[in-house]
Structures are given as structure tokens and as C-alpha cells.
Image (cartoon, helix red, strand yellow):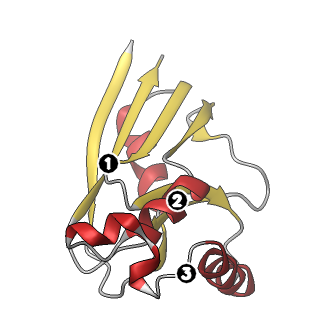
């Protein structure tokens, strides 16, 4: 069995942001030599997410508006978690909605994504360094 483990590092300068990481993950799949297998992409911080969707700016805006309605950042006092000195309770909730990781099949040496599917890193409490695990396994 072939395998590859790598870490992607991000430092999003804003509080929130989306980064299309598909090309980077595709490159890692090529490096791994895996022709048939699985690729796990996992956010390793509890205020960040990895998810699959369309790379379309209107949709990205809609995510921002929808997530802010679901879990608004302010007022900070609305969250018990923020009473510990933190100000990121909303980021934890946004991550919970958007998900922790994705697993994508590798078929004939390539990510087996749908026609519009792209892999994204979602940041909900940025301005500091965070990582994503990429684990590729297969034959």
C-alpha cells in the first residue's frame, strides 16, 4: 500500500475566509503515486473547517451571510464560551455546521470529484497559523 501524509499551513489575515485548496491536494495525490484509494483532508483546529462545494463568489458571499445569521460574532456576551476570555464562540459553531473533514476517492490517480466540486479550507477565527492534514492511502 502506498501512502502520503502532509500538512498544509494557513494564516488567513481576516477573521473569516475561504481558501480553495483543490490544486494543492491534487498535487499531493500525484506525488503519492496512489492510483486507487482515498484522500482525507482534515482541519486540525476547532475553529476551522474543510468542506466541498462550488467555487463561485456569490455562493461564498451567501455562506458568509448565512453563517453570520446562524452564529453571529456579536454581541460577544451572548456566548458563555466568551466569558472565559475568548471571543470566538461563533467560530466554533460555524465550524460545527461546515464540518471537520472530507474524504475523496482517488480513481485512476486523480481526485474523483463531481463537475463543480472543489475542496475548501474555511477559516472562522483567523489571523493565526493553523494546519490541515492531508492523508492519502491506496494502491
27 or 104, nearer to the observer:
104
Taking the image as shown, residue 44 lies to the left or right of residue 20, namely: left
Disc 2 is placed on an element classified as helix
Locate residue 68, reporting x and y percent: 60, 81
Compare marks 3 and 2 and give the one earlier in the sequence.
2
17 or 1, nearer to the observer:
17
Residue at 39% across, 81% down: 77
Q: Is residue 53 something that shows in the picture?
A: yes
16 or 104, nearer to the observer:
16
Q: Which mark is residue 139?
A: none
Residue at 31% across, 54% down: 45
Q: Nearer the viewer, mark 3 or mark 2?
A: 3
Q: Which mark is residue 72?
A: 3
Q: Nearer the viewer, mark 2 or mark 1?
A: 1
Q: In the image, is residue 128 above or below residue 108?
A: below
- Crowd tier of the residue under label 1, counting other residues whose Cα lies within 10 Å: few below 14, some 14–19, many 20 or above: some
Q: CA distance from mark 1 to mark 3?
A: 23 Å
Q: Is residue 123 something that shows in the picture?
A: no
Taking the image as shown, residue 112 lies to the left or right of residue 119, namely: right
Q: Which mark is residue 22?
A: 2
Locate residue 5, reporting x and y percent: 28, 35
Q: Nearer the viewer, mark 1 or mark 3?
A: 3
Compare marks 2 and 1 and give the one earlier in the sequence.
2
Quadrant where the N terminus is found in the figure: top left
Is the residue under label 3 in contact with that under label 1 (CB below 8 Å)?
A: no
Residue at 48% across, 47% down: 100
- The quarter of the picture where residue 135 lies is top left
Disc 3 is placed on an element classified as loop
Amino acid at each position: 500500500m502506498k501512502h502520503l501524509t502532509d500538512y498544509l499551513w494557513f494564516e488567513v489575515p481576516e477573521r473569516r475566509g475561504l481558501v480553495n485548496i483543490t490544486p494543492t491536494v491534487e498535487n499531493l495525490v500525484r506525488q503519492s503515486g496512489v492510483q486507487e484509494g482515498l484522500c482525507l483532508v482534515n482541519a486540525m483546529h476547532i475553529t476551522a473547517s474543510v468542506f466541498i462545494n462550488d467555487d463561485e463568489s456569490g455562493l461564498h458571499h451567501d455562506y458568509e451571510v448565512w453563517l453570520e445569521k446562524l452564529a453571529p460574532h456579536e454581541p460577544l456576551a451572548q456566548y458563555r464560551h466568551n466569558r472565559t476570555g475568548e471571543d470566538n464562540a461563533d467560530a466554533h459553531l460555524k465550524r460545527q455546521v461546515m464540518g471537520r473533514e472530507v474524504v475523496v476517492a482517488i480513481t485512476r490517480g486523480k481526485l474523483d470529484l463531481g463537475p463543480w466540486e472543489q475542496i475548501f479550507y474555511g477559516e472562522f477565527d483567523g489571523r493565526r497559523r493553523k494546519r490541515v492534514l492531508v492523508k492519502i492511502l491506496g494502491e
